[in-house]
Amino acid sequence: EAQVTQNPRYLITVTGKKLTVTCSQNMNHEYMSWYRQDPGLGLRQIYYSMNVEVTDKGDVPEGYKVSRKEKRNFPLILESPSPNQTSLYFCASSLSGFTDTQYFGPGTRLTVL
Amino acid sequence: AQKITQTQPGMFVQEKEAVTLDCTYDTSDQSYGLFWYKQPSSGEMIFLIYQGSYDEQNATEGRYSLNFQKARKSANLVISASQLGDSAMYFCAMREAYNNNDMRFGAGTRLTVKP
């Protein structure tokens, strides 16, 4: 089954404790991205990747890191989480054209205390 | 600058009636794609319908259609014969060819279908 998976689905952590949210897709997509969703703001892009070893900042990259060492994986790293990073996070993947639909993972609900 | 505007934070519709969710966009690119997603209370993002900037016909997918008015830069979603299961958040999004194909989202519209 074609899908984007994220882990964990739910996470409660404390300020400053490094964490990684994994994202994997099995559709051989070049393009992958991370979004955060906050009430009233829709989805805002954190980072995206056009292909292996090619990443770039989205609209809200501060406090986040990513890497793309393999085509299928695109982990999101929070080196020192803060309460303002409490949010719902989505990973998405697609082919790389402007006509291509992005397919989303199930989401990770993160709470930073 | 906000590229996608959804002016209706919340909408109500009676079951079996049609409803239009508004979306306007801003771009100077000639090549772009417009997308609508549904997010039910369970949280997942479900792709509904796509319209390309060069498409001359409005897109349709079952009960969903897209009222595309290019000159007005609007891409409204029309849901016909609303069902209770249509109650959800709906997001309009755009990908521009010149902008590394980033996808930008509106703030969303929460649709509630009344029985």
Image: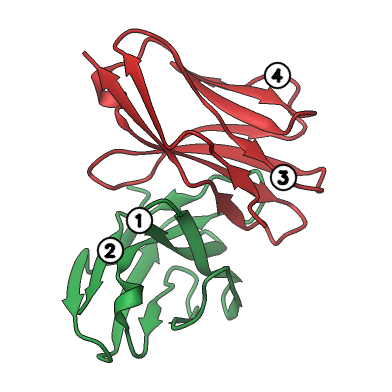
Chain colours: A green, B red
Q: Are marks 3 and 1 in contact (CB under 8 Å)?
A: no
Q: CA distance from mark 3 to mark 1?
A: 27 Å
What residue type is disc 4 on?
Gln
| Mark 3 or mark 1, whichever is nearer to me | 3
Name the residue tied to disc 1.
A105
Label of residue A108 in the image:
2
**Up-down relation of residue A88 to residue B55 (above or below):** below
Q: CA distance from mark 1 to mark 2?
A: 9 Å
Name the residue tied to disc 4.
B57
Residue A16 drawn at (x, y percent): 28, 91
* Secondary structure of residue under mark 1: loop
Q: Are marks 3 and 2 in contact (CB under 8 Å)?
A: no
Name the residue tied to disc 3.
B26
Q: Quadrant of residue B93?
A: top right
**Up-down relation of residue A105 to residue B10 (above or below):** below
Residue in the foreground of this view, choosing between B25 and A67? B25
- Looking at the rendered image, the quarter that the N terminus of chain B falls into is bottom right
* Secondary structure of residue under mark 3: loop
Q: Are marks 1 and 2 in contact (CB under 8 Å)?
A: yes
Question: Same chain for the residues at labels 3 and 2, yes or no?
Answer: no
| Mark 3 or mark 2, whichever is nearer to me | 3
What residue type is disc 3 on?
Asp
| Mark 4 or mark 3, whichever is nearer to me | 3
Neighbourhood count class around disc 3 (C-alpha, 10 Å): few under 14, some 14–19, many 20 upward: some
Q: CA distance from mark 3 to mark 2?
A: 30 Å
Q: Chain of mark 2?
A: A
Q: Chain of mark 3?
A: B
